Amino acid sequence: MPLSTKYIFISGGVLSSLGKGITTSSLAMLLQAKGYAVTVVKCENYLNIDSGLINPIEHGDAFLCEDGTETDMDLGNYERFLGKNLGADNFVTMGQIYQAVIQNERDNKYGGEDIEAIPHVTDEIIRRIKSAAKNDKAEICLVELGGTAGEYQNVLYYEASRIMKLTEGDTVVHVHVSYLPTPAHVGEPKTKPTQLSVKQLNAMSIQPDFLVARSETPIDKRRLDRLALFCNVHKDDIILNPDQKSIYQVPLTFHEQGFDTKILAKLGLADQPSDLTAWTNLVTKAISPDKKILKIAIVGKYFGTGDYSLHDSYHALFEALDHASIELGIKLEIKSINSEQLEKEGTNQLAGVAGIIVPIGWGARGTNGKIMAIQYAREHKIPYLGLCYGLQLAAIEFARNVAGLTNANSTEIDPETPDPVIYDIPFDPKYQRIKGNGSSMRLGAYDCVLKEGTLAHQIYGTTKITERHRHRYEFNNKYRNSLTDKGFVISGTSPDDFFVEMIELPKEMHPFFLATQAHPEYKSRPLSPHPVFLAFLKAML
């Protein structure tokens, strides 16, 4: 008997960055805990084919999947809450949809029809959603619609959800996440923005089955009554989602209101018991007071957006640090340092930090500031963790200031450097994939062999690991001996010994100096913090 999948569409209203992704992740986790096979699809509005070429300041940190797909950071939330790997099937952009429809037209797959937004674009959206559910053998597929109701960019996604509801009835439910602001000069939550958001849905012939009310504080009975009346949603189907100390409280808040049970009833599925003990213990540790505070510096260049600073550019890194700090019962005070500012003002702002991280980055801008931070960490014996570019720049810093190669550099920064310690290797299909204009990258999961007796081997507890990669430039093997002769340790390589994957300094030179060409932050999860981040924070302690 073929699998009959149920579908839950999650839309957002009033403003972006509302927590729609956390709502989707939380509901998916609860339904999985009920024993159902669950998958999630994110539908993005933009015309990019993936998130890999988008400036992190524009749309946050691109999340890297095991299969090498560069996605919206909400895929990371789904993976972390579900504890499972997702990939290309779970990420849809309007660029992918248009590209597929146009290619089908060129291949004459529409039999001479005139190609229109409806039904051809909506059919392609529905095909991809159902394909993701089928490939993942999902009993329930949650579909998060990017953006907010009323945007012209996402109207075809809403049309697709409307058509699926029309044609498949009780197989489809719609959850609308909307915001109830509390203006300071008024002092009470206002329901009108949400009323207008639901009216936008109604104008597209969509009536939400559930309303998730995002707010600073819990909503009272009067506000619930007004939402129910004007949004045409039964009061029992309005789920409260006020601000909380930790995002990991959200699933438990939903469960306490029976959101998971109500969804199953609406879909005609049997309710089943769930064990949320591990998640409850996680939340207890996450919100417990009186923790030891450690100050950590993250030296990057994607923090600034106008007059404001944001963390979304390094979202997965912040999440990985959060997982490890919860596990160890400590609180991190994170100092986000712009590497260009460090170049101008010097390293004084690093004084007093217990650890330094140099994360992912692209291009030459701000690299001198990052190298200054790495040198400061090495010379002051401060625990250092380098991620991707953080490995490459650590190799350059060591080459310049320890191995005596004063002009050492990366060809990404200086194509004419006499000592290209980091360089772009010729394309080889067994190692890389092409990403437009002949640009080659290593994307996705790759194996790594760790050298016994090293810090890396001690952290992982094994000699063979797999981590996700997202980069183009590599350590130049011509410089292995000149660096290792000075104490540099190559602790991890690809199985064929061609790629340098992990480097470190020996204990007699530094208490904790480790860098990886990979991105362990993409594999960390709240119930299983990544060992690299646990070890780094322990070294800080």
Image (cartoon, helix red, strand yellow):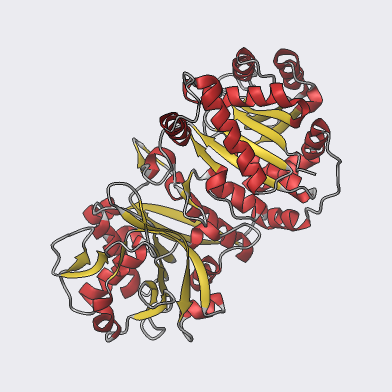
Residue 247 lies in quadrant = top right
Residue 43 lies in quadrant = top right
**Is 522 or 447 nearer to us in this picture?**
447
Q: How many marks?
A: 0
Q: Is residue 486 left or right of residue 10?
A: left
Q: Is residue 178 left or right of residue 57?
A: right
Observer able to see residue 181:
no
Q: Residue at x 40, y 46 (%)?
A: 52
Query: Where is residue 463 shown, x and y percent of the image?
Result: 52, 80
Observer able to see residue 134:
yes
Q: Residue at x 17, y 75 (%)?
A: 405
**Is 132 or 146 nearer to us in this picture?**
132
**Is 232 or 319 nearer to us in this picture?**
232
Q: Residue at x 62, y 24 (%)?
A: 180
Query: Where is residue 467 shown, x and y percent of the image?
Result: 49, 65
Query: Where is residue 307 shown, x and y percent of the image?
Result: 35, 36
Query: Where is residue 10 shown, x and y percent of the image?
Result: 64, 32
Residue 524 lies in quadrant = bottom right
Q: Quadrant of the N terminus?
A: top right
